[in-house]
Image: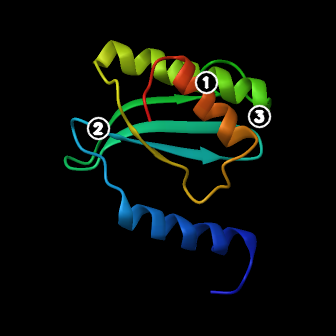
Amino acid sequence: MGFNKENRRLKIRKSIRSKISGTKERPRVSIFRSNKAIYSQIIDDSSGHTLVSSSSTEIKLFGKNNIESCKKVGLKLAEKAKKKGIKSVLFDRSGYRYHGRIKSFADGAREGGLKF
């Protein structure tokens, strides 16, 4: 495993996942960032099911992976989570630094009513 950005991120992701695990009462918010889109899921790790998901492709923002669209994805995820009765979650940043698009997503989810 050579040293590059992606391998570094995967190593950090593995470290984070060994420390946190979502439950039915407090599921985990997982996030994936690509060059063109952002994807997020609320996952119950005890049963291995995805409870809620949201992405920029779903809300017709494909190709607009910027700070504003990430905030909208966070708001949409929080709205769906409220309908399912989810209020409190664990935030899994998947090895990405907490700034820019990831921070914007988290701020949008908090604005929508999710508690991290």
- Compared to residue 80, the image places residue 103 above or below, namely below
Q: Quadrant of residue 18?
A: bottom left
Say what secondary structure mark 2 lies in. loop
Which residue is rendered at x = 44% and y = 36% of the image?
116
Q: Are marks 3 and 2 in contact (CB under 8 Å)?
A: no
The x and y percentages for residue 47 are 19, 46
Q: How far apart in space, not on screen, are marks 3 and 2 (Cα)?
A: 28 Å
Mark 3 residue type: Asn
Can you say whether 47 is above or below 104 in the image?
A: below
Question: Which badge, 2 or 1, comes first in the chain's sequence?
Answer: 2
Residue 52 in the figure: left or right of residue 78:
left
Q: Amino acid at mark 2?
A: Arg
Give the residue number, with chain letter if any, for mark 2. 26
Task: Tell me the element at label 1.
Answer: helix
Identify the residue position indicated by label 3 in the image.
Answer: 65
Please tell me whether mark 3 or mark 2 is closer to you in this view.
2
Distance between mark 2 and mark 1 Cα atoms: 19 Å
Left or right of residue 105, residue 88 in this image: left
Q: Residues within 10 Å of mark 2 (few under 14, many from 20)?
A: some
Q: Residue furthest bottom?
A: 2
Q: Quadrant of residue 87?
A: top left
